[in-house]
Amino acid sequence: MSILIAITGRDNTKLITKLQERLPSTLIEQWPDCKNVNNVDFVLAWKAPESMWLQLPNLKAVSSFGAGIDSIDLTLLPEHVEVVRIVDEQLAEDMAEYVLTHVLAQKLRLKEYYIKQTQQAWQPKRAHNNKHVGILGFGELGKTCAKKLINNGFKVSAWARNNKTADNVSMFYGADGLELMLPDIDYLVCLLPLTKATKGIINYSMLAKLPPRAVVINAARGGHVVEQDLLDALNNESLRGATLDVFEHEPLVGSHPYWSHPKITLTPHCAALSDLNSIIEQIVKNIEYLNQGLALNNRVNRMEGY
Ligand code: NDP
Ligand code: OXD
C-alpha cells in the first residue's frame, strides 16, 4: 500500500516529514510524483486535481485535509471508496471563539468605529441591544458555537437537516423551520457544509426573510452566499452588516467589492485552522483501521455530501 498526498496551494514538507515519522514503513508520495498509482489505497486530499481521481485503480479511502469535504468531487470516486474528514475539538473551540468575537464586534459597532477612526470622527453610539443568534448547521462546529454564545448571554436558535433537541437552543429543521426561524434573528451564522442542497442558500429569498437589523456571519464556505444578493441587501439597507471568512474564489481578488465595503468585515479563511499534529494523529489512526479492515473514524455520508 502507499499513501498519496494531494493537497494543493500549500507547502506539504512538514506534513510529509511528520507523517513519515509516524509511519516509517509506509510509502508516502506527493501528487503528481507517484511512482506506482496501482499501489495507492489512501489519499489525503485538499483541492486535488480532478484528473488524479481517475488514475488510482486501487483506491480504498480518501481523507479530507480539513473538516469540509466539498473540495473532493465525490462523483469521481467509485462507490466503495470511503471518505473521511477531520473532526477536532480544538478546531470547534476556535470556530466558537471566532463566531462569538464577530457577533460581539457587530453588536458593539466596531467596524463603524474603525471607519470613524480614519476620519478622526468622535461619534459615540450605544451598542446594539440585539441578542438572538441563528446558526445554520448544528454539527460539530454549530453545537460548540451555540454553547459558547449561550454562556455569553446570547439567545440561540439553530437549523439542521434532521429534527433534534438541544439544551437551551430552539431547534428548527427543514424548509418550513427555516422560514419560522429567520424573521426573529439578529445574527445569522452559517456553519453548514457546502452540498448541492446548501449551495447559494444565503440568497435574495433568505435575506428578505431576515429583519433589516440582522447581520450575516459566514464562516462555512463562500459558495453558500450569492454574492450580488448579499451586496444588494447591504446596499439597500435590508441587512445591517456581514462578516465573511470564506469566499467563492480564494484568495479574494483585489478588485472584489467586498474589500472596501463599509458594512463588510472580512477575514482570510482563518476562522478555525486545523492543527497539523491533530490531523496527523487522525490520519494515522484511519490508516491503521484501513489496514486492519476496521470501520474508519469520521466517515461522511457520500449520498448527503457531508
Ligand atoms: P457537520 O457535518 O458536523 O455538521 C453539519 C451540519 O449542517 C449538521 O447539523 C447538518 O444537519 C447540517 N446540514 C447539512 N445539510 C443541511 C441542509 N440541507 N439543511 C439544513 N441543515 C443541513 O459539519 P461541521 O460542523 O464539522 O462543519 C461545517 C462546515 O464548516 C464544514 O463543512 C466546512 O465547510 C466549514 N469549516 C470552515 C472553517 C473555516 O475556517 N472557515 C473551518 C472548518 C470547517 P444534521 O445534523 O441534521 O445532519
Ligand atoms: C476546513 C477549513 O474545512 O479549514 O477545515 O475550511
Image (cartoon, rainbow, N blue to C red):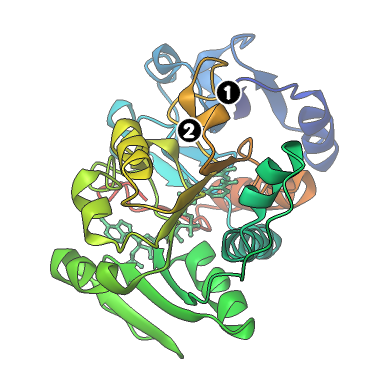
Q: Residue 253 is drawn in which quadrant?
A: top right
Residue picked out by circle 1 = 251
Q: Which residue type carries mark 1?
A: Pro
Residue 163 appears in the picture as rendered: yes
Disc 2 target residue: 247
Q: Position of residue 274 (x, y in %)?
A: 68, 47
In front of the other: 11 or 28: 11
Name the image quarter holding residue 88. Answer: bottom right
In the visual, does 1 lie left or right of 24? left
Q: Quadrant of ligand 2?
A: top right
**Do the CB atoms of the residues marked 1 and 2 lie less than 8 Å apart?**
yes
Q: Position of residue 175 (x, y in %)?
A: 16, 63
In this view, the residue farthest toward the bottom is: 167
Asked which secondary structure carries label 1, the reply is loop
Tell me what residue is drawn at x 48 percent, y 74 percent: 130
Q: In percent of the image, x 52 and y 77: which residue is there? A: 129
- The x, y position of residue 115, in whole percent, is 66, 41
